[in-house]
Amino acid sequence: MEFTVCPLCESPSIRKKRGVYKFDIQGEVLSTPVIQYSECPDCGEAFFDREANQKIDEALLQPRKRKLENRSQRKSAPRRQTKKPQPT
């Protein structure tokens, strides 16, 4: 989808950009790979097409998926049994 007018402020000054985009997610700054997107210079809002959204999802969600997978692997790993001390 190509933006010619900003959907938020209705400015006709939309600019196409290409580069790395940074997101602040719960205080963690994550960067995308190089993507093409539109940005409104008047309100500062950025808009992404389908291809950019797919790249964003891959870049931002993959590290989180790996963390979740690592957690689930740790939980499902067999636990070592410790020997209980024998009463004397």
Image (cartoon, rainbow, N blue to C red):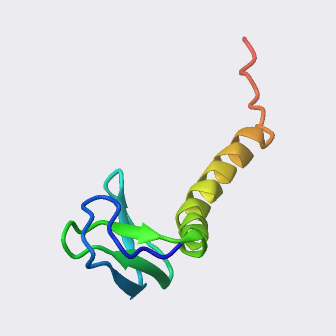
- Closest to the observer, 11 or 47: 11
- Taking the image as shown, residue 68 lies to the left or right of residue 16, namely right
Horizontal and vertical percent for residue 49? 53, 71
- Closest to the observer, 78 or 37: 37
Give the answer, above or below, for where 15 lies relative to 86: below
Residue in the picture at 30% in, 66% down: 45
Residue that protrudes farthest toward the right in the picture? 78
Horizontal and vertical percent for residue 7? 35, 61
Horizontal and vertical percent for residue 87? 72, 11
Residue that protrudes farthest toward the left in the picture? 42
Residue in the picture at 31% in, 78% down: 14
Horizontal and vertical percent for residue 8? 30, 58
- Closest to the observer, 83 or 24: 24
The C terminus: image quadrant: top right
Tell me which corner region of the image, top left, top right, bottom left or bottom right, holds residue 43.
bottom left
Residue in the picture at 71% in, 21% down: 85
Tell me which corner region of the image, top left, top right, bottom left or bottom right, holds residue 15.
bottom left
- Closest to the observer, 80 or 66: 66
Number of marks in picture: 0
Residue in the picture at 69% in, 51% down: 69
Tell me which corner region of the image, top left, top right, bottom left or bottom right, holds residue 72.
top right
- Taking the image as shown, residue 84 lies to the left or right of residue 23, namely right
Give the answer, above or below, for where 80 lies relative to 65: above
